[in-house]
Image: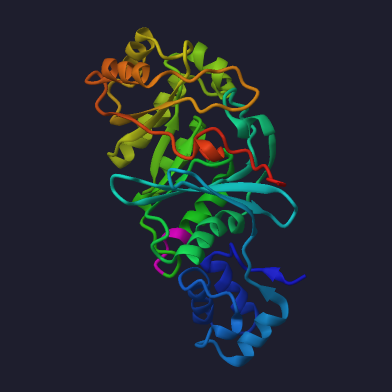
C-alpha cells in the first residue's frame, strides 16, 4: 500500500524530497499543497515538475479517514464519525455560536481514554490507542474540505481522549495548524483541554506555544475529585494548581476552568464557596455546564435555576463566570457524550 503523507510535518516533507534527490523547496511546495491548498492529487500540483509528481504518485498518497457517519443537531451542531485505517472510530464536532456566528471545531486526540472519568462516555471505553499526527490533523482538514477556508474559527482539543497524554502528536499537529504554509490558524484560536495532567501542563508552559489552556476541574476538593475523576489520585489538587500557576505566570494569560455540575454531588453553596477559594489568585474564568446524560450512568442533571444559583454565589468571588449552554445533546455530541460508536442504522 502507498504511504499516506497526511500528518507529515514540514521538516519531514522536506527530508522526503531531499531523499528523493530533490530540493528542500520542493518539499515546501508539496507541504503547502497538502495543508494550505488541500490538494491531494499530485497531478494537480502544477509547480512541481512532472518527474517529481510521477515519483510521488508511484509510492505515496494523501488521504483522509472516511466519514462513517454524520449527524446534525436541531441546534446546528454537527457530529462526524471517522473510520480510521485500522477500523477504529473517533468523533469530531462542529459547534456554531449563536451570538458571534463563529464556528468551533472540537477534535479528538485518542481512541478512547485511559483516565476513566465516572461521568464520561469516552472514559467508559477505556484506552485503545493514541491518534497519529495525521489522524489529528485530518479532522480540521476534513472540515475545510467540506466547508471551505472559513469552516471553523476556533479549535478545541475537547473530544475523545486526553491530549496531554498524546503530547508529541498533538503539538506536531498544532505546528501544522499554525504554520504559515500549513493551515494558518492562529495559536490563540486553539485550546488544549486537560483533565489535569500536571506534568503535561508544565511541559506546555515550557514549550513556547501560544495555545490556550482549559482544565476539566469539576470538583472543589480532592476527595470529591477522586470520586469523579481517578486522575486526582495521581495529580492532587495542590500539584495541579501549582502547575496551572506556572502556565499562567509564563504566558500572563487566563486559564479556563471547566466545571460540570452534577445534581446533589458538586452543586451546593458550600461547593461554590470552596471552588472560589481554590482558584483565588489564579487569572482565570470559570465555565459552568450542566451534566449531559450518558446512558447507564446514575448522575442527574441540575435545573437551569440551580446552575444559575451556583453561578451567582461564585461571581464576584471568582473573576469571571460563564454558564455554558450544552450543544448537540440530541445527537450525543455534547460534553462527555462522545464514544466513537458507529451508527449501524
Image spot of residue 211 (x, y percent):
39, 47
Q: Is residue 6 left or right of residue 58?
A: left
Q: Is residue 164 visible?
A: no
Residue 340: percent from the left, percent from the top? 64, 43
Residue at image point 56% right, 91% down: 49
Residue under the image location 47 percent in, 40 percent down: 203
- Residues in magenta? 176-180
The answer to whether residue 178 is magenta is yes
Q: Residue 200 appears at what percent x and percent y?
A: 50, 37
- Which quadrant: the N terminus? bottom right
Residue at 58% x, 40% y is 160
Res 322 quadrant in image: top left
In the displayed structure image, the side of residue 37 where residue 58 appears, left or right:
right
Is 298 situated left or right of 192 in this image? Answer: right
Measured as percent of width and height from the top left, residue 7 is found at 58, 62
Q: Nearer the viewer, residue 220 or 98?
A: 98
Amino acid at each position: 500500500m502507498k504511504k499516506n503523507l497526511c500528518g507529515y510535518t514540514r521538516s519531514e516533507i522536506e527530508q522526503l524530497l531531499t531523499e528523493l534527490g530533490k530540493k528542500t523547496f520542493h518539499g515546501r511546495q508539496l507541504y503547502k499543497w497538502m495543508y494550505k491548498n488541500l490538494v491531494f492529487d499530485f497531478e494537480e500540483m502544477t509547480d512541481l515538475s512532472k518527474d517529481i509528481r510521477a515519483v510521488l504518485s508511484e509510492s505515496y498518497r494523501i488521504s483522509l479517514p472516511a466519514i462513517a457517519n454524520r449527524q446534525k443537531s436541531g441546534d446546528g451542531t454537527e457530529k462526524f464519525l471517522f473510520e480510521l485505517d485500522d477500523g477504529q472510530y473517533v468523533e469530531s464536532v462542529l459547534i456554531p455560536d449563536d451570538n458571534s456566528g463563529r464556528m468551533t471545531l472540537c477534535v479528538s486526540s485518542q481512541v478512547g481514554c485511559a483516565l476513566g472519568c465516572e461521568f464520561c462516555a469516552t472514559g467508559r471505553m477505556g484506552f485503545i490507542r493514541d491518534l497519529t499526527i495525521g489522524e489529528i490533523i485530518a479532522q480540521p482538514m476534513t472540515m475545510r474540505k467540506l466547508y471551505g477556508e472559513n469552516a471553523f474559527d476556533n479549535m478545541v482539543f475537547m473530544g475523545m481522549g486526553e491530549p496531554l497524554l498524546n503530547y508529541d502528536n498533538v503539538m506536531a499537529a498544532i505546528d501544522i495548524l499554525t504554520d504559515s504554509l500549513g493551515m494558518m490558524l492562529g495559536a490563540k484560536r486553539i485550546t488544549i483541554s486537560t483533565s489535569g495532567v500536571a506534568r503535561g501542563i508544565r511541559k506546555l508552559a515550557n514549550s513556547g506555544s501560544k495555545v490556550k489552556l482549559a482544565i476539566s476541574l469539576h470538583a472543589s476538593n480532592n476527595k470529591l475529585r477522586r470520586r469523579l475523576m481517578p486522575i486526582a489520585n495521581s495529580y492532587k489538587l495542590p500539584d495541579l494548581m501549582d502547575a496551572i500557576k506556572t502556565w499562567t505566570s509564563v504566558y500572563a494569560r487566563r486559564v479556563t476552568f471547566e466545571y460540570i455540575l452534577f445534581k446533589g454531588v458538586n452543586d451546593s453553596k458550600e461547593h461554590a464557596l470552596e471552588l472560589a477559594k481554590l482558584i483565588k489568585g489564579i487569572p482565570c474564568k470559570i465555565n459552568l455546564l450542566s451534566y449531559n446524560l450518558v446512558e447507564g450512568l446514575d448522575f442527574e442533571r441540575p435545573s437551569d435555576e440551580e446552575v444559575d444559583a451556583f453561578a451567582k454565589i461564585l461571581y464576584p468571588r471568582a473573576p469571571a463566570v460563564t454558564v455554558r449552554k450544552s450543544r448537540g445533546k440530541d445527537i450525543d455530541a455534547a460534553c462527555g457524550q462522545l464514544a466513537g460508536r458507529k451508527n449501524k442504522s
